[in-house]
Amino acid sequence: MTARHTLTGRLTVPLPPEEAFTLFTPRGEERWVEGWRPRFPAPAPDDTAPGTVFETSHAEPTTWVVLERRPGRRISYARVTPGVRAGTVTVTLTADGDRRSTVEVTYDLTALTPGAAEDLDRFAADYPAFLRSWQDALTRADEG
């Protein structure tokens, strides 16, 4: 049983980092993640401000906290899916030419139960396909 995985992969976005950054914010992901509807238990005029808490339930109920942000460059979240897994997600953007960004996505997750460890192992094995699904969704959103 593996209880923890740190996974890093990359994708590209046809926008400069300053514009692409918004796609990876709590509200920005609504533009391309099907079923993503963040709920903020407290007012969040700036959803990227460190300390901002939000919840999602598009795949499973998860609580998120913005840990840090450097607009146009990086955003990092803590995430907890109760009884399943906890960890961080960090998105780092770098310019790749004039109008493109390379997006590095790192998930550092720990399973909270033996059953969740099996699911996390499967997620780790499928991580490249997971990021390809992000690439596909971002491309569809850009075309739409």
Image: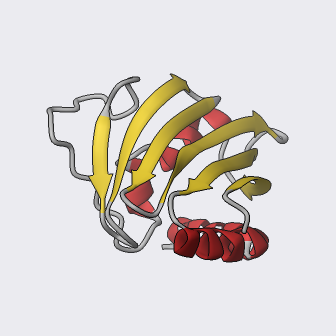
Q: Residue at point 60% right, 75% down?
A: 119
Residue 13: quadrant of the picture: bottom right
121, above or below 39, in the image: below
Residue reaching furthest to the right? 97
Question: Which residue occupies the foreground of this view, 92 or 97?
Answer: 92
Q: Is residue 83 left or right of residue 105?
A: left
Question: Which residue occupies the foreground of this view, 137 or 82?
Answer: 82
- Image position, residue 27 (x, y; %): 35, 48
Q: Residue at point 58% right, 65% down?
A: 138
Q: Residue at point 37% right, 70% down?
A: 60
Q: How is the image coloured?
A: secondary structure
- Image position, residue 8 (x, y; %): 78, 51
Residue 83: quadrant of the picture: bottom left
- Image position, residue 109 (x, y; %): 61, 52
38, above or below 115, in the image: above
Question: Which residue occupies the foreground of this view, 78 or 9?
Answer: 78
53, above or below 123, in the image: above
Q: Is residue 134 left or right of residue 25?
A: right
- Image position, residue 4 (x, y; %): 69, 54
Q: How many marks?
A: 0
Q: Quadrant of the N terminus?
A: bottom right
Residue reaching furthest to the left? 42
Question: Which residue occupies the foreground of this view, 31 or 129?
Answer: 129
Q: Is residue 139 left or right of residue 35?
A: right
Q: Is residue 123 left or right of residue 19?
A: right
Visible residue check, residue 133: no
Q: Residue at point 51% right, 58% down?
A: 112
Visible residue check, residue 66: yes
